[in-house]
Image (cartoon, rainbow, N blue to C red):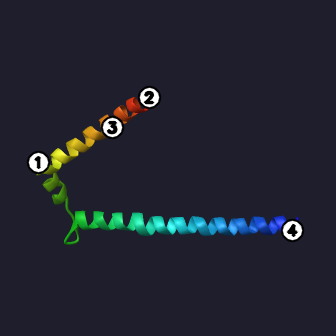
Amino acid sequence: MEAKAKKSKLLNILLIISVGAVLYFLIAFVLLPNISVLKSSFVVDGSLSFSSINKIIKSKRVMDGLKNSFLMALTLPVTVSIVGIM
């Protein structure tokens, strides 16, 4: 019975270490870089600015790319489903 308790304790420790490692990497490589990009995009001279959004909306090239991306996002699942059913 004691061997089973030691094994259970070891598995709990490994689980805690694994969850901690996953959380660390998510924070370090996903959350912090995204916060940094948002901060550098919207904070100019210490104040909040939406000039970057204004530039994006006025750019025809960017708007065409967004339109094409949304068109693909809407049509791709339908065509893949049709091909998958055949």
Is residue 73 left or right of 20 when viewed as pictured?
A: left
* Residue 41: quadrant of the picture: bottom left
Distance in Å between CA atoms under marks 4 and 2: 54 Å
Distance in Å between CA atoms under marks 4 and 1: 70 Å
Sort mark 1 into few (<14), some (14-19) or many (20+) by Cα contacts within 10 Å: few
At a point 38% along the width and 35% down the height, the residue shown is 80
* Image quadrant occupied by the N terminus: bottom right
Is residue 77 left or right of 69 when viewed as pictured?
A: right
Q: Secondary structure at mark 4?
A: helix
The residue tagged 2 is 85
Q: Nearer the viewer, mark 2 or mark 3?
A: 2
Q: Amino acid type of disc 4? A: Glu
User: Of callouts 3 and 1, which one flags the residue occurring earlier in the amino acid sequence?
Assistant: 1
Q: Amino acid type of disc 1? A: Lys
Q: Amino acid type of disc 3? A: Leu
**Residue 77, percent from left and from top:** 37, 36
* Residue 5: quadrant of the picture: bottom right
Q: Nearer the viewer, mark 3 or mark 1?
A: 3
Mark number for residue 60?
A: 1
Distance in Å between CA atoms under marks 2 and 3: 14 Å
Mark number for residue 76?
A: 3
Q: Amino acid type of disc 2? A: Ile
Q: Are discs 1 and 2 less than 8 Å apart at CB?
A: no
Q: Are discs 4 and 1 less than 8 Å apart at CB?
A: no
The residue tagged 4 is 2
User: Of callouts 2 and 3, which one flags the residue occurring earlier in the amino acid sequence?
Assistant: 3
